[in-house]
Image (cartoon, rainbow, N blue to C red):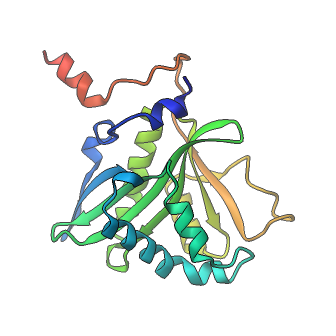
Amino acid sequence: MSYVTSANKLKELAPLCKELLVYSNKDLEIDMYIQKVSELDKKVLDWAISLTERNMKSLYETCAWGWNKDDKVEQMMDDTAWYLIAKDKNNKLQAFSHFRFDMDFGDPVLYCYELQIEAEGRRRGLGQRVLSVLERLAQATRMRCVRLTALTHNPTAAAFFRACGYSLDETSPPKEEISHYEILSKATEATAMEDDTLPEPPNTRIELAGA
């Protein structure tokens, strides 16, 4: 069984990153949870789609892709989609990531399709914490890296990802061929184990150690 197949068969991802799902920065207090798209409340999914449109529509319209809401909704509702949802102490939704465990150019990767944050939650470390959760999940499920697509005409996002340790991936197309996007990635720590067995969730190991 491949690492990707094993990861997608997991029922719960929270035990793999439990300590990272609570975040605070001054008056911003955040709780996060992770669900498959099939388990996501419709109101939450509708909000995620709306936030993506509010944040990304104009950027898509000014590049070769163009904006097609139906295509974006179809992508966000793919059966393999997972969602990391962040809400504040007042239960207001503040950020989300749509990600998947997938084989990409022969590599088992955690692919971050979306990382979207409400305006009031930006520049407060929340985006970095969301990436930290994805990186922990990628490591725990034996993915080779976290990989994502970044629009080159969104320099703020590009600078953010690079500040978080992401760099140009070997699968990124040559700039002379495609100039409106690039592929960035951050590798997980190398693992010496070569079997297909997923590691036990960290909290399980702690409980066993204390037994």
In this picture, is 133 found above or below 58? above
Residue 47's spot in the image, x, y percent?
37, 73
Task: Determine the residue positioned at 54% across, 22% down.
Answer: 1
Residue closest to the far left: 211
Query: Would residue 14 be found to the left or right of residue 141 on screen?
Result: left
Residue 149's spot in the image, x, y percent?
62, 60
Task: Determine the residue positioned at 60% across, 75% down.
Answer: 154
Residue 169's spot in the image, x, y percent?
68, 49
In this picture, is 34 found above or below 58? above
Residue closest to the far right: 176
Q: How many discs appear?
A: 0
Query: Would residue 93 be found to the left or right of residue 115 on screen?
Result: left
Residue 90's spot in the image, x, y percent?
16, 71
Query: Would residue 10 be found to the left or right of residue 208 on screen?
Result: right
In this picture, is 106 found above or below 37? above
Query: Would residue 171 be found to the left or right of residue 9 on screen?
Result: right
Task: Determine the residue positioned at 43% across, 24% down.
Answer: 198
Task: Determine the residue positioned at 43% across, 59% down.
Answer: 97
Q: Quadrant of the C terminus?
A: top left
Front residue of this view, candidates 132 and 55: 55
Q: In the rendered image, which quarter is residue 74 located in?
A: bottom right
Front residue of this view, candidates 134 and 101: 101
